Amino acid sequence: MTSELTQTITHHISVATGVPFTAVKCHAQGGGCINQTMIMTDGQRSFFIKLNSGQYLPMLMGEAKALKAIDDTQTIRVPQVICYGLGGGAQGDKAYLVLEYLPLTHQNRAQSWHIMGQNLAAMHRVSSSRGFGWEENNTIGLTPQPNPWTESWPEFWQKHRIGFQMELARRQGWRCAVSEATLFQAIEALLADHKPIPAMVHGDLWGGNASFIDDSHHGSDAELVPVIYDPALYFGDREVDLAMTHLFGGFPEAFYQGYREAYPLPIGYKQRQDLYNLYHILNHFNLFGGGYGAQANSMIQRICR
C-alpha cells in the first residue's frame, strides 16, 4: 500500500469514527481471492481493509450496504462498516472498504454452531413486501448479480440467477449438457408447488464466509459469537443459503439442528439443493474455469432426471 493511499484511508477512518487514527502497522491478511486484504492498526484500534482497483468501488459499496442491511436486522453479527472510497493518487486508482476488525477464532464448538443456525433463521424471517430481489444490483465474487424486484420466485431464479450465469458461461465456451428449454422446464417443475416467502439471504454462505469471535473472558460456549461476512445479499428463498452451506466442506450438523428448531424447513428442500447450488458452480466456472463446467453439467443432468 502506498503512503498516499495509507494517508487517505487513515484520514477517512479518523473522520468516520470521530477519533484521530494514525497507522503504525499495516500487514497483509491472507484468504481473499477477489480483493487484497490487510489489517491496519495504531496499536489500540485495528481495522480490516479490502482493496481493489478503482473500477470495483461499486462492488465494495454494495458489500457495505449489504452488511449494513444485515446489521440493521439485529439478528446475526457482521463486521461494522467504517468507510469506503477511492485513493492512491490523483486518478483514485484504488478502491477501499474499511471494516471493523474481528479476531476470528478457530475454536469449533457444537453449541456455537447451533446458535449460528438459530441466528441465521432469525435473519431469514426478515422479509420484503416487494418480492424477490433487492434495491440494487450487486456482485457474487466479481460476477455481476442482477436483483430486479420480481413477484415470481421461479421467474427470478430461472432468469436472473441460472439463465444469467449460463449466458456468461456460454461466452467462455461452456456448453450445457441439455437444451436450455429442457433445463428450464425442469426448474419450473421443481419449483411449481414451492411458494417461498421472500427472505433476506446472505447469498454466498459457504464455510469461508462464516466463523466466530471470542468475546469470552470465561471460556463458555455462549460467548463464542457467530459472525457472517462477504454477503451477496438479496431477498430470495431462504433455502438458497442452506443449500450452499453443503458446498465446499459443509457445516456441522449442530448448525442445521439449530436452524430447524428455530425455522423448520419445508418438504422437498433436499430436492431443490442441486438447483440452488448450480448457481454457485456456474459462477465458479465463470470466475475460475477448470472442472466447474463439468460439475455444473453433472448437476444439470440430476436436476433434469
Image: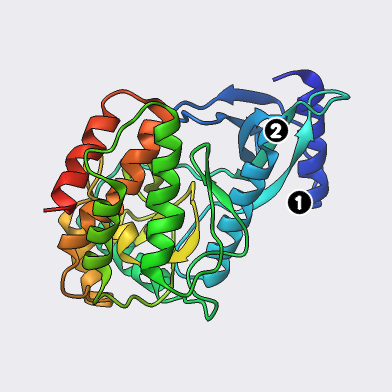
Instruction: Point out residue 93 in the picture as x, y percentages from the top left corner.
Output: 76, 25
Instruction: Point out residue 55 in the picture as x, y percentages from the top left corner.
Output: 70, 33
81 vs 221, left or right, is right
Which amino acid, by three-letter code, is at mark 2?
Gln
- Which quadrant of the rendered structure holds the N terminus? top right
Q: Which residue position holds label 2? A: 55
Between 54 and 29, the one nearer to me in the picture: 54
Q: Give me the residue at 16% from left, 61% from top.
A: 271
* Secondary structure of residue under mark 1: helix
Residue 45 at least partly seen: no
Label 2 environment density (alpha carbons within 10 Å; few <14, some 14–19, many ≥20)? few
Instruction: Point out residue 141 in the picture as x, y percentages from the top left corner.
Output: 48, 39
Distance, label 2 to label 1, CA atoms, is 26 Å
Label 1 environment density (alpha carbons within 10 Å; few <14, some 14–19, many ≥20)? few
Between 142 and 22, the one nearer to me in the picture: 142
Instruction: Point out residue 294 in the picture as x, y percentages from the top left corner.
Output: 23, 31
* Secondary structure of residue under mark 2: helix
Which mark is drawn over residue 17?
1
Q: Quadrant of residue 80?
A: bottom right
Between 108 and 87, the one nearer to me in the picture: 87
